[in-house]
Each structure stands twice: as structure tokens, then as C-alpha cells.
Image (spheres, helix red, strand yellow):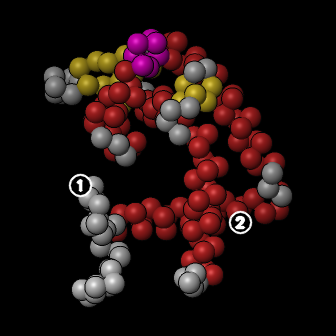
Amino acid sequence: MKPVIPQPYQEVFKLIGELSRALRCCQQEEAFCLDLTLSQFFILHSIAGQGKIQLAELHGLLSVEKSTTTRMVSPLIRRGLVIQERAEHDSRALNLKLTSRGEEVYRTVWGCLAEFIDTIRNQIPRDERKRVFEGTQVFLKALQDAGRLRPAGKRKSKGENHGCCQRPNRRSNSSD
């Protein structure tokens, strides 16, 4: 028997799935422009916005583990787009700064990104853009808040639930 799932739940689930598929172009492993991923560009953007940024601060901005941040920054350093410097106040802390080549690549990629953004914007009727953008921000915040409410930490092993699902008690039955 097919389970009865309320229509509003089906609509939200479908929207999340479609958004996830549509955003694959923005995932870490796929090059976006000039052989940079969007995540790597986000790093360049974060550095450019502040002039320099501490590596530790970047972990929080990217919402990834420290080792993942280091792994994402390393190719940017190897390509000569970013340099690491010891922080003046703490010799253990590292600051990241764009090189002149990094600044040039940053400007060029913004050109690619602007075309991508224009393509998206042009798909939305002009008189609806503000409403769509605001609605998307509300939906994004709801997703983020819901994600924060879920238990974090270690992965659950097979058979464990995440606290959101309660399994009905199973009775011993010879027909199982």
C-alpha cells in the first residue's frame, strides 16, 4: 500500500530535490571558471572582501572542517593566487592574502559569475525578481534553521534514527 504523504510535504521535498540538482554546478568538485570551483572562488571573494583573512575564520565561513578548508586553500596557494602569512598577534595563526595574480583571477571570475547571474536573473520576470529573491531568502533561512535543529556530530550507523523518526515497536511474530 502506498503511504499517504500530505501534499505540502511532497511539494517541499520535491523543491529541495530540484534545488539540490540545480545547484550541482556550484558543488566543490566541479570547475566553474578558470579551473576554479565555486567554493574556491568563495575563498578568493572572502579574502578580497577583507584584504586578508585568518584561516581559522575561513572554516566558519565555509561551514566545513579545518582539514577541508586547508585542502581547499592549498591549490590556490600552489597556483600562486593566495599567500599564507603568519599572523602578527599569534605566530600559530595563518593569514591568507591574495597575490596580484589572485586579484586578477578574482576580477576575471567575477566577469564569468556576472554572466551566470545575469542568465539566472533574466529567467525571472523583472517585476517578480524582488519577490522571488526575498522568498528564496526566507526558504533558505528555514532550511538552515532546520539543519541546525538536527542532531550534529557522529554519523548514525545503520538502524539508528536521527531523533526525527520514531520506529514503531515491532512485536515478535513468527511470520517475520
Q: Is residue 42 visible?
A: no
The residue that appears at 76% across and 49% down in the rendered structure is: 121
Percent coordinates x, y for residue 94 in the rendering? 26, 25
In the image: residue 175, left or right of residue 16: left
**Which residues fall within the magenta stretch?**
75-82
Is 172 drawn above or below residue 66 in the view shown?
A: below
Circles 2, 1 touching at the beta carbon (< 8 Å): no
Circle 1: element type? loop
Q: Residue at x 61, y 30 (%)?
A: 32
Q: Specify the quadrant of the image occupied by residue 7.
A: bottom right
Task: Name the foreground residue: 52 vs 106.
Answer: 106
The reply to whether the magenta stretch includes residue 169 is: no
Q: Quadrant of the C terminus?
A: bottom left
In which quadrant is the N terminus drawn?
A: bottom right
Q: Amino acid at mark 1?
A: Lys
In the image shown, does 64 or 50 lie closer to the viewer?
Answer: 64
Instruction: Check disc 2 and give the amino acid type.
Output: Arg
* Residue 56 on image: x %, y %: 27, 36
Pick the residue in front: 35 or 82.
35
Task: List the single residue furthest toward the front.
Answer: 174
As drawn, the label of residue 131 is: 2
Residue 50 image point, x, y percent: 43, 33
Q: Earlier in the sequence, mark 2 or mark 1?
A: 2
Q: Image height check: is 41 above or below 103?
A: below
Q: Look at mark 1 in the image and give the residue it sits on.
A: 154
The mark closer to the camera, 2 or 1, is 1
Check residue 163 in the rendering and tell me which mark sits there, or answer none: none
Number of marks drawn:
2
Distance, label 2 to label 1, CA atoms, is 39 Å
Q: Identify which residue is drawn at 32% across, 28% down.
A: 70
Using the rendered view, name the quadrant where residue 126 is placed.
bottom right
Q: Which residue sits at x=58%, y=16%?
A: 104
